[in-house]
Amino acid sequence: MTEQRDRLLRGLPAVHVMMDDERIQRASAGANPAIVRDVIRECLDAARARILSDSLDQQPALVEQIIHQLDLLLGSRPTSVINGTGVIVQTNLGRAPVSASAAQEMAKAAASYVALETDLESGQRGGRGHEVESLLRALTGAERALVVNNNAAAVMLVLASLSAGRGVIVSRGEAVEIGGGFRVPDVLRQSGARLVEVGTTNRTYARDYSEAIDDDTAAILRVHASNFEIIGFTARPELDDLVALCRERNVLLIEDVGSGCLLDTRPFGLAHEPTLGESIRAGVDIVCASGDKLLGGPQAGIILGRAAVVDQVARHPLARALRADKTCLAGLAATLRHYIRDEATDEIPVWWAISRTPEWLERRARRWSQALGDCAEVVRTDAVVGGGSLPGKLLPSFGIAISAGSLNVQQLAQRLRIGDQPVVPRVVDERLIIDARTVLADQEEALIDALRAALTI
């Protein structure tokens, strides 16, 4: 092994030799030579480390590895992928795609000056996000609204500004991990608040909250169970009961509803998902939600509630550190207008996908199968909303199962992922599935081309 290792180390080319390689020169055309040189050095260092660790069977082709890294830096590969997983709000694929008009407004805002903090009529400095606030107030009935860069930031800001140094009561069944290792108790402690847990994992009553309230209590935090489901022997107070308790005891009620839902999910065959308007109408003091889940907009953290309370949040120094940028505000405004115009299911990709009927999806899958021939079979599938929304609730769907002769399922899946137009499929019981519900309306032709390319051996 030592002799083989020494031979491989001696065989590693010099940097200047790789700089002169025609394939690398084509891949790096127009790039800063110093950057190209650094990429080559990094790939050579990685190859050397693999040889020294005896990972000889994991040694990728050096030139291909360098070209791959250059592609990542130069943007030679497409950033968009086709989602065939059946997960509508696919966190690993960027959560909710925005509507065409929202994307256009975001691009316009990024490429030009905008009246972000200027009142064009008076010429005076105006409030940031006033347009989005007006739309959110109209859609939810909230007195005030504030937008920050994501929902974790929204919750952190609300807790820091309203309860730092004081107690916040949370049910043990709601002291959850919200993804990426971020846990509600950790966020709460980082805000400066003191965590007060009540109840049990599966059963918490209004009296548990009432008995925990003391002179040091700032708020009750209610967290919607958006990314998990507890079934069976469970109990949870109704929202109205918590509102009444908080008013009686003069403490704030903060609710993290997560998904940012603005439409009733039940007409689409789904369980009820709490909406922002329902929480506001119930009398919750502060409501926090995401902009890029069921709302279907760009990543954002939305804070709604009573004017005096939201104003206090907006004055906290963290509000500036966490504020949303102009592209986010432009995209969010365009998204909210779809709800104002009652066109969300036609224009917002998340709701377009949710609202497709099984019959429509079956016809779509049959078109794909006919285009691909014998290698594609129409199959029934179950799609999910995803993104921590409506856990355990399935949407009946259709898709196609692909087979590719000499390629096994994992090989075919990899070919789809690394093709000129990446496609991310779902693998179920050693079958490669493309779910018709999550392929966007304008992606059918690109999907068929990508599948044909991957199936060409």
Image (cartoon, helix red, strand yellow):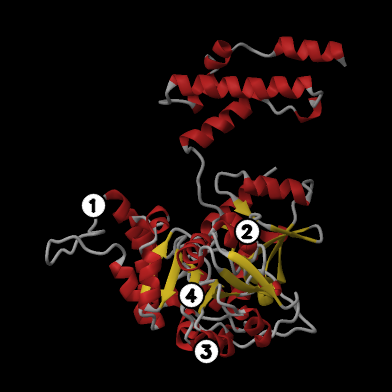
Looking at marks 1 and 4 on the same chain, the residue that comes earlier in the sequence is marked by 1
Q: Name the residue at 65% across, 79% down.
A: 212
Q: Nearer the viewer, mark 3 or mark 4?
A: 3
Quadrant in which the C terminus is drawn: top right
What is the three-letter code of the residue carrying label 3? Glu
Left or right relative to 450: residue 112: left
Dot placed on the residue nearer the N-terminal end, 4 or 2: 2
- Inspect the image, locate mark 2, and give the three-letter code of the amino acid beneath it: Asp
Q: Who is closer to the viewer here, 363 or 124? A: 124
Determine which residue is flagged by label 3.
248
Q: Residues within 10 Å of mark 1 (few under 14, many from 20)?
A: few
Name the N-terminal-most of marks 3 and 1: 1
What's under tag 1, amino acid-wise? Tyr
Precedes in sequence: disc 2 or disc 1:
1
Is residue 190 positioned above or below 253 on the image?
above
Q: Residue 230 placed where, x, y %?
A: 74, 77
Marks 2 and 1 sit apart, C-alpha to C-alpha, by 39 Å
Q: Answer whether labels 3 and 4 touch (C-beta < 8 Å).
A: no
Q: Which quadrant of the rendered structure holds the N terminus?
A: top right
Between residue 206 and residue 284, name the one nearer to us: 206
Q: Which mark is residue 287?
A: 4
Question: Callout 4: helix, strand or loop?
Answer: strand
Q: Tell me which amino acid carries mark 4.
A: Val
Q: Nearer the viewer, residue 310 or 134?
A: 310
Q: Which residue is mark 2?
A: 186
Q: Which mark is residue 113?
A: 1
Residue 418, above or below 171 = above
| Closer to the camera in the image, 322 or 417 | 322
